[in-house]
């Protein structure tokens, strides 16, 4: 509760929350406001915004409603952001906790693998995966998660390294608790706070990664996405600059909201930075 | 739609200098009035100006610059300035002499004799002879070159009775018109002395061509640029006019427009910029925009049906889908008038086009729905009749068309899921594994239906052959027709056979040839003698010059 | 002696990591639909199946995956990156021809992000809690949140299309045929927008890191002592605090060296720059295994070297830190 109260005194957290609610509202209302497939042909291509009341934000170069794509795109971004973050957290926490708890050759092996993932540029790894396994939405979230777990693993491992020496862990061992129980019931809850703060960074980055993939024409073609709209707008940048501008702002706002919330949580958890 | 590609010098691109100048003198004037530039009086004094650098854009990044072993539109943009073919394509699709000065065929059509140009030197100073032609034909065209391997299937030998005569011997009759038309793109000659006895695929000259053309190789940075300089010893005295020629790779459409407008590049080919920019630049008097000079570059956008799948095995379903796509609307609103619905696999720009031979499928969604009902694909509770995957090839244009197909079929209850693949994935999935329901692609018309059109319908093409019959549809009647036409030396008879071929191909539509487009060029209004032949981007540009 | 130990430790860590990377990428790429010859056929427009088989044989693509992996690794031991199928050239030649553009882009973006981030971060920390701090922090977050490829597009729209001040893409003005200082100037003009675009996100990160670590160091005892000794505030900041606050920054640079190459893929695409990022993307599309492995190998080596340098730097700045700790 204290944390929540502190969170609510952090201006960053509040602004972030407001922005996130905005994006969430867009995603939630997409189905009601724009019940049709956002990728269906709606009208003449490249109508300017605020001219035709049917298309408030105009149409793109394939005659699709930009506003509909913006709203449905919010769904895509949030969905990818959340699920990719979950994947990254699960993989990272698993690798980090096992590595940190057991140490020894298990640790060495897992850390070498972590370093391998860290050494290869993650966007290039993502490109390879997308080209090979295809750009379906469900796979995409998994693949983005798969290239963003390394920092989570290191963070978790570091926490485990300190926590496993603590007395309560020793006590559990003496009581004869199984390893799994100690890892997940005893140590993990204590190791989670920094991971949760970091989750906001992973989520922000996942949204950016998805938009970059879509921009390069590598996201799911059957789903509306902000990045795809930017890519479409790029082709008509000189005649219809607004097509690329608006979805870019949307990505910015979504990522900003997540980062601000992350900072809010951080401020709340980190007493040194609290203003007295 | 205004098309500003100047109408000057339609004829005489290969006549002597004096003629060219006179043509430029007379006809060029009209073009500039159209373009709103200089006064006719100023233009009347124009004589070709020597010097200057021409930079043009291309989006294709090439990994080999040897047109004797590789044939594509892109490679000809790069290499045709350095390496020359036996013949090239003149106006009205007539062959004009290049390295060959004359040709004749024996009565049985099995022996074709080329007389070669004398006094031609390779860029390294050695003389060009019939041995070079023989080497290229037997070792490169027949063995390695895509299309060439098919064209020269029955080539058994090339005799060289003297240094300036090459006699091609075929086991089966070779129609002269087929060979000459194909030769413009497939019979480029590189020097034997550079390649003989080396690993042909890894020879360094594949990336630093030695040829006989008006420009010499300077440097090539793959994915960036190719730089060429004037060949002072070119066999046409006084030509080329330009000092330097730069081909620059810009593989983004919007960036290409930007470079044209800033003057960084002076020409762009193959409809490389967005349609909206094409329409805009067409109104700008700094540019000439249009399809002129690209007549030989006609492409067909296709919708292919995998007839092995149960839904598409029924011809009524294929016809229904063909009726469901409003191609006229697409041409007007998306292609902005630069394109029209196609009438079968032989485009209307071809001399083989027989009006009325194709079965047409006009836009008629009611009929489409009726056909689907009749075939037993009724609408389900959610309004969906069937769900199909659609795989487009890699071009932006085709991907946009795929979206349009998806949108159109949705309206008649056919749900389409687009699956994007890169080139290798496309070939593996669509052409080799036949793991698709619908595909949309580009068919490049190669001037003669025997070169690149019939292969889309013939049976017996091995799996994995890109751009062939991956639709699983066969017709013994069509197969026989196609084989016979390949060895038919009587020209009107051949044309009639291809008319029949179109009829068969469009009746059961294993693949619908949906749209017909001629490539659009954008060029600086300062260029002269540009776009004066039907495949101009892929020609030598020896006579091109830049007005001040 | 310490240097030797440090080096040995790094090697012991790096060799297995490299092996994992190379084998992983090699095996994953085996799962891709189609191979390099298919991609090649795609470029040709058409070809028959026998020609395809012939090409596969010629480029050594016909054996089984395991034996080809062994062949590849054995070649690598002899420092031979192999032959690129799609470029028809030795891999090393192609990479070296693309390296300058990427290096120029990444290094200048990194330098810009580092110095701008440090200056602005210090400013924010010294004004901690005041409106300047809030503004800077917010700005940092906005920079972090803006997709770089989109910023690039907007830059092109404003500075190339509307104002006409900067070129919209490419590395140099080819038709001008510049040389010497003019060429350098011309390239700098072309690289200005891409550099700024690529730098934004790293600027935002460095800004946050330096601000946080400045705040942390400022609260430590030795700073109080320095202040008590009567040193001027600027001297305290720059001589004592910044020096220590830079440590986490250096770590981050080590961690992100690889990521930057990935980030440059989209930027190179926006500004049509002939760099390594695009080359890697092309290599994937072309199924050019040797090329992709070559790029991954080179970039991994680069990351390892940078991290080694970071280790050394650490040991220099803070002698208490031991390698591997």
Image: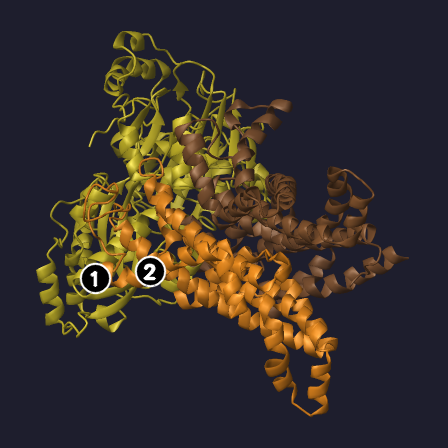
Chain colours: A orange, B yellow, C brown
Residue B315 as seen in the image, left or right of residue C164: left
Q: Is residue C87 visible?
A: no
User: How crowded is the residue under tag 1: few (<14 C-alpha within 10 Å), some, or many (20+)?
Assistant: many
Measured from the top left, where is residue C177 in percent x and y?
55, 24
Relative to A187, say whether A72 is above or below.
above
**SS for callout 1:** helix
Relative to C260, say whether A8 is above or below.
below
Relative to B286, say whether A169 is above or below.
below
Residue for point 37% across, 11% down: B47
Q: Residue furthest right?
A: C1
Tell me which corner region of the image, top left, top right, bottom left or bottom right, holds residue B85.
top left
Measured from the top left, where is residue A230 in percent x and y?
38, 47
CA distance for labels 1 and 2? 28 Å
**SS for callout 2:** helix
On the same chain: label 1 and label 2?
no
User: How crowded is the residue under tag 2: few (<14 C-alpha within 10 Å), some, or many (20+)?
Assistant: some
Residue nearest the viewer, comparing B63 with B371: B371
Tell me which corner region of the image, top left, top right, bottom left or bottom right, holds residue B463.
bottom left
User: Which residue is denoted by mark 1 in the rendering?
Assistant: B410
Label ID, residue A25: 2
Residue nearest the viewer, comparing A267 with A183: A267
Q: Chain of mark 2?
A: A
Measured from the top left, where is residue C34 in percent x and y?
46, 62
Residue for point 37% across, 49% down: A247
Q: Quadrant of the N terminus of chain B?
A: top left
Relative to A250, say whether C97 is above or below.
above
Find out whether the residues at labels 1 and 2 contact each other: C-beta distance under 8 Å: no
Residue B306 as seen in the image, left or right of residue B356: right
Q: Is residue A130 visible?
A: yes
Q: Quadrant of the C terminus of chain B?
A: top left
Measured from the top left, where is residue C235 in percent x and y?
77, 39
Residue B317 as seen in the image, left or right of residue B220: left
């Amino acid at each position: 509760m204290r944390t929540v109260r502190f969170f609510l005194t952090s201006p960053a957290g509040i602004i972030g929350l407001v922005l996130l609610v905005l994006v969430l509202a867009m995603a939630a209302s997409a189905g009601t406001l724009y019940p049709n497939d956002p990728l269906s042909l709606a009208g003449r291509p490249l109508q300017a915004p605020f001219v035709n009341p049917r298309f408030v934000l105009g149409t793109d170069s394939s005659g699709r409603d930009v506003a509909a794509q913006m709203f449905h795109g919010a769904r895509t971004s949030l969905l990818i952001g959340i699920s990719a973050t979950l994947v990254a957290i699960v993989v990272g926490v698993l690798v980090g906790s096992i590595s940190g708890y057991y140490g020894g050759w298990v640790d060495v092996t897992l850390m070498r693998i972590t370093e391998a993932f860290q050494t290869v540029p993650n966007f290039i790894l993502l490109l390879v995966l997308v080209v090979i396994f295809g750009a379906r939405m469900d796979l995409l979230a998994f693949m983005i998660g798969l290239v963003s777990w390394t920092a989570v693993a290191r963070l978790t491992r570091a926490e485990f390294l300190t926590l496993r020496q603590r007395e309560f862990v020793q006590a559990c061992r003496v009581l004869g608790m199984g390893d799994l129980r100690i890892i997940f019931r005893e140590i993990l809850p204590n190791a989670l706070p920094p991971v949760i703060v970091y989750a906001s960074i992973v989520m922000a980055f996942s949204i950016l990664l998805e938009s970059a993939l879509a921009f390069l024409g590598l996201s799911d073609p059957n789903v509306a996405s902000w990045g795809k709209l930017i890519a479409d707008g790029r082709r008509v940048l000189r005649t219809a600059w607004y097509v690329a501008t608006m979805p870019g702002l949307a990505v910015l706002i979504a990522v900003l909201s997540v980062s601000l919330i992350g900072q809010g949580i951080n401020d709340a958890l980190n007493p040194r930075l609290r203003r007295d | 739609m205004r098309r500003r590609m100047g109408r000057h010098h339609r004829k005489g691109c290969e006549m002597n200098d004096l003629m060219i100048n006179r043509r430029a003198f007379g006809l060029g004037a009209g073009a500039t009035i159209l373009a709103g530039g200089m006064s006719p009086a100023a233009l009347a004094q124009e004589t070709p100006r020597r010097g200057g650098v021409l930079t043009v854009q291309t989006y294709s990044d090439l990994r080999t610059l040897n047109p004797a072993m590789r044939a594509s539109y892109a490679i000809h943009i790069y290499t045709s300035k350095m390496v020359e073919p036996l013949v090239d394509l003149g106006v009205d699709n007539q062959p004009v002499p290049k390295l060959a000065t004359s040709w004749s065929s024996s009565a049985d059509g099995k022996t074709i004799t080329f007389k070669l140009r004398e006094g031609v030197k390779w860029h390294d100073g050695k003389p060009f002879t019939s041995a070079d032609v023989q080497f290229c034909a037997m070792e490169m065209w027949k063995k390695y070159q895509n299309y060439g391997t098919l064209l020269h299937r029955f080539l058994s030998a090339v005799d060289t009775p003297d240094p300036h005569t090459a006699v091609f011997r075929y086991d089966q009759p070779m129609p002269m018109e087929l060979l000459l038309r194909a030769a413009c793109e497939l019979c480029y000659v590189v020097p034997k002395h550079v390649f003989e006895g080396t690993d042909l695929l890894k020879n360094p000259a594949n990336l630093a061509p030695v040829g006989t053309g008006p420009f010499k190789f300077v440097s090539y940075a793959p994915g960036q640029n190719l730089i060429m300089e004037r060949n002072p010893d070119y066999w046409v005295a006084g030509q080329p006019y330009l000092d330097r020629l730069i081909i620059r790779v810009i593989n983004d459409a919007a960036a290409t427009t930007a470079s044209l407008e800033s003057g960084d590049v002076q020409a762009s080919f193959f409809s490389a910029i967005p349609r909206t920019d094409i329409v805009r630049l067409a109104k700008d008097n700094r540019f000439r925009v249009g399809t002129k000079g690209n007549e030989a570059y006609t492409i067909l956008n296709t919708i292919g049906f995998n007839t092995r799948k149960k839904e598409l095995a029924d011809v009524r379903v294929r016809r229904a889908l063909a009726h469901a796509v409003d191609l006229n609307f697409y041409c007007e609103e998306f292609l902005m008038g630069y394109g029209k619905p196609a009438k079968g696999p032989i485009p209307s720009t071809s001399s083989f086009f027989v009006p009325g031979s194709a079965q047409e499928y006009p836009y008629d969604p009611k009929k489409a729905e009726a056909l689907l009902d009749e075939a037993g694909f009724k609408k389900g509770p959610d309004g969906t009749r069937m769900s199909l995957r659609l795989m487009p090839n890699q071009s932006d244009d085709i991907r946009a068309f795929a979206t349009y197909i998806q949108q159109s079929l949705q309206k008649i209850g056919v749900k389409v899921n687009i699956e994007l693949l890169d080139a290798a994935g496309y070939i593996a999935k669509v052409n080799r594994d036949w793991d698709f329901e619908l595909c949309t692609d580009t068919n490049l018309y190669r001037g003669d239906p025997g070169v690149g059109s019939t292969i889309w319908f013939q049976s017996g093409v091995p799996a994995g052959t890109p751009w062939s019959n991956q639709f699983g549809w066969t017709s013994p009647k069509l197969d026989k027709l196609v084989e016979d036409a390949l060895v038919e030396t009587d020209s009107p008879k051949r044309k009639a056979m291809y008319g029949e071929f179109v009829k068969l191909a469009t009746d059961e539509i294993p693949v619908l040839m949906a749209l017909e487009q001629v490539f659009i060029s954008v060029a600086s209004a300062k260029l002269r003698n540009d776009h004066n032949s039907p495949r101009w981007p892929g020609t030598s540009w020896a006579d091109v010059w830049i007005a001040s | 002696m310490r240097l030797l130990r440090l080096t040995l430790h790094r090697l012991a860590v790096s060799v297995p990591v490299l092996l994992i990377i190379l084998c992983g990428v090699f095996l994953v790429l085996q799962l891709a639909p189609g191979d390099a010859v298919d991609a090649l056929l795609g470029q040709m427009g058409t070809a028959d199946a026998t020609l395809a088989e012939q090409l596969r044989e010629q480029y050594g693509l016909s054996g089984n995956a395991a034996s080809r992996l062994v062949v590849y690794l054995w070649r690598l031991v002899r420092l031979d990156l192999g032959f690129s199928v799609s470029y028809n050239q030795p891999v090393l030649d192609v990479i070296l021809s693309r390296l300058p553009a990427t290096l120029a882009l990444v290094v200048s973006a990194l330098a810009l992000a580092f110095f701008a981030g440090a200056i602005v971060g210090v400013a924010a920390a010294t004004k901690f809690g005041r409106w300047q701090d809030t503004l800077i922090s917010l700005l940092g977050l906005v920079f972090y949140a803006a997709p770089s490829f989109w910023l690039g597009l907007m830059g092109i729209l404003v500075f190339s299309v509307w104002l006409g001040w900067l070129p919209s893409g490419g590395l140099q003005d080819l038709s001008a045929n510049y040389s010497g200082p003019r060429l350098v100037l011309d390239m700098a003009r072309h690289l200005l927008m891409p550099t700024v675009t690529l730098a934004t996100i790293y600027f935002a990160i460095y800004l946050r890191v330096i601000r946080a670590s400045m705040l942390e160091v400022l609260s430590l005892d030795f700073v109080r002592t320095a202040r008590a000794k009567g040193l001027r505030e600027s001297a305290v900041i720059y001589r004592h605090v910044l020096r220590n606050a830079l440590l986490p920054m250096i770590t981050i640079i080590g961690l992100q060296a690889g990521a930057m190459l990935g980030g440059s893929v989209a930027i190179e695409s926006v500004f049509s720059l002939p760099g390594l990022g695009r080359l890697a993307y092309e290599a994937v599309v072309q199924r050019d295994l040797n090329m992709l492995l070559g790029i991954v190998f080179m970039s991994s080596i680069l990351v390892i070297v940078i991290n080694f340098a970071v280790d050394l730097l650490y040991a220099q700045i803070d002698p208490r830190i031991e390698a591997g700790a």
